[in-house]
Amino acid sequence: MLASVIPETGGPEVITVEEVPDPEAGDDEVRIAVEACAVNHTDVWVRRGHEGEPPIITGIDVAGRIDAVGDGVEDHEVGDRVVVYWNTTSCGDCEFCNHGEPTMCRDYGGLGVKTDGGHAEYIAVEARHVVTLPDHVSFEKAAAVPSNFGTAWRGLMTRADVGPSDDVLVLGASGGVGHGAVQMAAHAGATVYAASSSEEKAEKLRELGADHVIDYTETDIDDAVAEITDRRGVDVIFESVGGETYEQAVKSLARGGRLVTIGATAGDADHAMLPHVFWKQLEIIGATGATMGEFEDMLDAVFAGEITPVIDSVISLDEIPAAQERLSKGEGFGKIIVRP
Ligand SMILES: NC(=O)c1ccc[n+]([C@@H]2O[C@H](COP(=O)([O-])OP(=O)(O)OC[C@H]3O[C@@H](n4cnc5c(N)ncnc54)[C@H](OP(=O)(O)O)[C@@H]3O)[C@@H](O)[C@H]2O)c1
Ligand SMILES: [Zn+2]
């Protein structure tokens, strides 16, 4: 089969499309003919050597059709349309896994990071990690949501427990994760603020449920929040950008506010902002990935049409290097999807 491979760490030029052996469906596994697989920022981190260990086939978020089943598989059959829970590597037997927290397991990582992913014509995974896709949900939309909307769900719904009384600000709002967070906050009944870099992106964010959109290229985020909230600040911030944006975020929180950090696209912050944290009695909350239960709750909301991913573009395997470059520049809106 053909696959997009990162043979070694380096720039986008190291990525190759290669002929590799077809995977087989082992015991309790299904083999999926991949119809769609998202491009993620994590693919860039793997290529740069921050996560995972090349050589590896990238591709975390997989949707496709089962084309072979191994011995012991009872709940799925050849032809089923499915979407895959990407965290296939957590050990299932450590103190965190045993408490139902597989995203805290040392082996957390899964497809495209710890084991070959879905930027390929086929992938084999354990049957317990696949969920049947209703006919009205396209493969592209299914592949757009697993790790992205899954992480937004865990961060906002589980970790921050967002509800109708909250003012929620989403940073990195036009990204694969952020545009899901905007919709989840709106669906939870919160008043939604979003920060983005252009009027074109702002318009799309309003359509997804943002009540207030801040253009951070024109004003500091905390100044804009202070003006809109009459200096009160917001209750919850969903933050994936890092760097100076984190510092502006901490300044934007109301007393008793909570900040969920899930990423640092622009790098680490220089300052922890300790005086703001203790004076305002803030909670800084980390979130990564999603449990199978959170994944299924998120999918239920997608299948019901309550939240829906935006597809930025659909590309082929050999366009992955250019897609990674677009992600690194913060271009686009929503998800880039590969059809292998
Ligand atoms: N912890 C986890 O489990 C987890 C899961 C998924 C992703 N992540 C991390 O979360 C971050 C966001 O992921 P994503 O998939 O949403 O990324 P994405 O699709 O590339 O979107 C990121 C968005 O951030 C904004 N941005 C602001 N400053 C930026 C900068 N300096 N460089 C690039 N973009 C910038 C851009 O929107 P504007 O133009 O509107 O500002 C961009 O669209 C990544 O760092 C990713 O690795 C973590
Ligand atoms: Zn474990």
Image: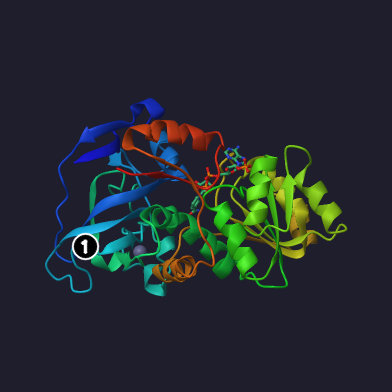
Neighbourhood count class around disc 1 (C-alpha, 10 Å): few under 14, some 14–19, many 20 upward: few
Q: Closer to the camera, 108 or 140?
A: 140
Asked if residue 297 lies left or right of residue 81, the reply is right
**x and y, in percent, of residue 112 in the image:** 34, 47
Rendered-image quarter of ligand 1? top right
Q: Quadrant of residue 323?
A: top left
Q: Secondary structure at mark 1?
A: loop
Picture quarter with the N terminus: top left
Residue under numbered circle 1: 79
User: Which residue is at a point 49% across and 69% down the rendered structure image?
Assistant: 301
- Vertical placement of residue 54 versus 151, above or below: above
Q: Residue furthest left?
A: 71
Q: Amino acid at mark 1?
A: Gly
**x and y, in percent, of residue 334 in the image:** 52, 48
**x and y, in percent, of residue 276 in the image:** 77, 55
Asked if residue 99 lies left or right of residue 55, the reply is right
